[in-house]
């Protein structure tokens, strides 16, 4: 393999039901940034059935070229079918970098393709940079998020990475942007496609288990009453969090027992734990002190919870929480605009 | 039916702490465990064994002490345990690991290969699909439910973000299983006793047919350039500020953590 033969960045433009996944647009945005020091083109690979119309959107978000494989056999994601086309495109176009979303499909496809090509793959990256030697620096969390590692793929091409959705900024849509669309003739070795999809079933969010939540927004006696938990629900809804509570709120009948954190409730270890109007009694702290990051909001400066918090806010949660929720809403609206 | 279960011994990452002063990982005293998704993989195999009868081979690649998880697998009900261990495997990335494991599995009989979706130390979810590719087998990853039916056909619920694919695949195939798929059984007493009579087979590079240039650190396309912790956990900072400023502080922190 001659590394110098490989040029450009290829983004896998994942679509589902003919809708481009957000992460694909984020990756095109990131790819544009990486293409700058490399002085190369950004291409997107779009696979699906009846998806030709999506190509111009990918250009509007920053792709210089879109390679489209439009075939009814590609309508529903199939590991082998997608791997065959993806591998063929990589072998022909020889991109130096290949990026895909770290979705349940991307993480199924990427290892299959990288293994077929015999090149390196880095999973679930949260940061991508170009190094001094023009190689890709791929940074990702490991050891349950306790450690960050920067990975390189120095002697093999392409350098492949799956990237966590929601991390990279996507570009503003620019309808005036120009780019090339290349249609691919689809030919598949169907004998190798051995997995048959019988049905795709959508499920409502699973029943709530506070020990499984990545983020908990927890309320205590300081919430004042059951109606005020709406405030916490509002925030939780914006950040995929679940609302939990202290024993005081459960004993007062404001929240059901299965949401209780603490010695007599559940022990939780989310990435982020919001303690809102919770004083920080030992029995509560015992159930949440192992949380990765604890944010406490309490109007009492002397509340014990501040001893356990990574970030403490002395203030009125009825003012602070709605402001936080509003701000997040605005950021999200700006992002998707 | 012959089933091969791939497993890994991992540090219990929920027990890992950062040194508050240096910010480095404290690994001393952290227990080594059978990776949770792999335990779920073994449980799926054991359920098939209970229902239809099966011979289960548990295989792991790792240092000599990884033998412990194979003994645990024996005690849960596995029939055979293979420890792939050799200095030449040291420093393998996912591709080199899958190359070694696939080469070892080539020396075994199997109808179904089951692995955990991902290991809690690396969280890559790559080795399973990479083994499937080396062995030219169909794969189904993110398995949350499976049923074995007529003519060696498996009906599987494969999780996606907002639901699942219901798929069908005929053995031989490779599956990667989520820990939510089941509740692994405990080791039974007789099993624990027998586990220490049974022999874990030690395989080195000499027991497999493989291109040695594709193994270990040198055979790994990816290299760790550097690793770092997110820093020592500072004593929490308490802000007594206007609500608007407080909201900014919180939102900035959430951004930093990629939550928004």
Image (tube, coloured by chain):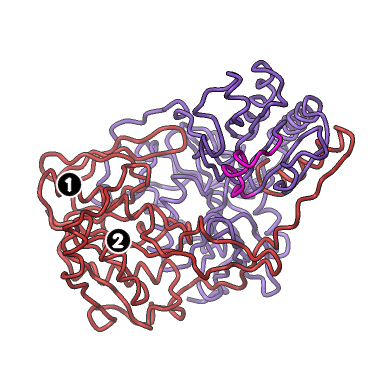
Left or right: B171, with B28 as reference point: left
The answer to which of A209 and B152 lies nearer the viewer is A209
Magenta span includes A288: yes
Q: Is residue B240 above or below residue B69?
A: above
Q: Position of residue B146 (x, y in %)?
A: 25, 40
- Judging depth in this view, the residue of B178 and B206 nearest the camera is B178
Disc 2 is placed on an element classified as: strand
**Residue A303 placement: quadrant:** top right
On the image, the x and y values in percent for residue A138 come to 60, 63
Q: Quick check: A313 left or right of A7?
A: right
Which residue shows up at 35% across the image and 67% down it? B98
Q: Residue at left 68%, top 40%? A: B260
Specify whether B222 is left or right of B119: right
Q: Residue at x 86, y 33 (%)?
A: B244
Q: Chain of mark 2?
A: B
Rendering coords of residue A266 (x, y %): 51, 37
Q: Secondary structure at mark 1?
A: helix
Query: Label 2 crowding class (10 Å Cα cut-off): few <14, some 14-19, many 20+?
Result: many
Q: Which residue is mark 2?
A: B6
Colour assigned to chain B in the rendering is: red
Q: Which label is found at residue B48?
A: 1
User: What chain does mark 1 sit on?
Assistant: B
Local crowd size for mark 1, using a 10 Å CA cut-off: few (<14), some (14–19), many (≥20)? some
Query: Where is B117 relative to B23, above or below?
Result: above
Q: Which residues are magenta?
A: A279-292
Relative to B244, residue A106 above or below:
below
**Which chain is drawn using purple?**
A
């Amino acid at each position: 393999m001659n590394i110098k033969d490989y040029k450009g960045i290829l983004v896998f433009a994942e679509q589902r039901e003919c809708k481009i996944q957000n992460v694909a647009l984020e990756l095109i945005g990131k790819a544009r940034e990486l293409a700058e020091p490399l002085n190369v083109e950004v291409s997107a690979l779009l696979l699906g059935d009846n998806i030709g119309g999506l190509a111009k959107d990918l250009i509007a978000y920053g792709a210089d070229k879109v390679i489209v494989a439009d075939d009814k056999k590609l309508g529903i994601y199939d590991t082998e079918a997608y791997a065959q086309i993806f591998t063929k495109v990589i072998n022909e176009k020889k991109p130096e970098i290949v990026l895909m979303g770290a979705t349940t499909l991307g993480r199924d496809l990427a290892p299959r393709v990288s293994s077929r090509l015999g090149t390196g793959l880095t999973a679930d990256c949260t940061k991508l940079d170009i190094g001094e030697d023009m190689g890709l620096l791929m940074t990702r969390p490991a050891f349950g998020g306790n450690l960050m590692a920067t990975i390189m793929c120095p002697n093999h091409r392409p350098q492949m990475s799956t990237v966590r959705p929601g991390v990279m900024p996507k570009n503003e849509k620019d309808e005036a942007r120009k780019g090339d669309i290349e249609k691919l003739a689809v030919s598949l070795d169907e004998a190798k496609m051995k997995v048959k999809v019988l049905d795709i079933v959508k499920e409502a969010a699973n029943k709530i288990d506070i020990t499984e939540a990545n983020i908990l927004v927890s309320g205590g006696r300081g919430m004042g009453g059951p109606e005020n938990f709406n405030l916490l629900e509002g925030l939780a809804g914006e950040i995929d969090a679940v609302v939990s509570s202290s024993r005081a709120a459960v004993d007062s009948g404001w929240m059901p027992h299965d949401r209780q954190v603490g010695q007599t409730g559940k022990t939780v270890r989310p990435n982020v734990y919001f303690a809102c109007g919770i004083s920080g009694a030992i029995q509560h702290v015992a159930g949440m002190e192992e949380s990765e990051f604890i944010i406490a909001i309490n109007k009492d400066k002397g509340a014990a919870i501040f001893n356990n918090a990574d970030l403490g806010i002395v203030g009125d949660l009825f003012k602070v929480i709605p402001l936080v929720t509003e701000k997040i809403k605005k950021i999200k609206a700006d992002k998707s605009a | 039916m012959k089933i091969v279960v791939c497993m890994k011994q991992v540090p219990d990452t929920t027990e890992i702490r950062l040194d508050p002063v240096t910010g480095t990982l404290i690994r001393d005293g952290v227990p080594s465990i059978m990776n949770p998704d792999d335990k779920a993989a073994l449980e799926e195999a054991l359920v098939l064994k209970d229902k239809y009868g099966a011979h289960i081979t548990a295989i792991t690649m790792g240092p000599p002490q990884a033998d412990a998880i194979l003994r645990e697998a024996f005690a849960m009900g596995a029939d055979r345990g293979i420890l792939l261990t050799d200095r030449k495997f040291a420093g393998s990335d996912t591709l080199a690991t899958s190359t070694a494991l696939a080469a070892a599995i080539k020396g075994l009989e199997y109808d179904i290969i089951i692995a955990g979706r991902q290991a809690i130390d690396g969280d890559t979810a790559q080795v399973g699909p990479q083994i499937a590719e080396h062995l030219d087998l169909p794969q189904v990853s993110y398995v949350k439910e499976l049923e074995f039916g007529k003519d060696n056909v498996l009906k599987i619920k494969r999780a996606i973000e907002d639901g699942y694919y219901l798929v069908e695949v005929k053995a031989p195939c490779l599956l990667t299983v989520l820990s939510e798929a089941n509740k692994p059984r405990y080791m039974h007493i007789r099993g624990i006793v027998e586990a220490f009579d049974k022999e874990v087979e030690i395989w080195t590079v000499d027991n497999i047919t493989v291109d040695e240039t594709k193994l270990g650190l040198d055979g790994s396309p990816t290299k760790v350039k550097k690793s770092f912790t997110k820093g020592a956990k500072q004593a929490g900072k308490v802000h007594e500020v206007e609500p608007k400023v407080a909201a900014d502080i919180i939102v900035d922190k959430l951004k930093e953590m990629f939550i928004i």
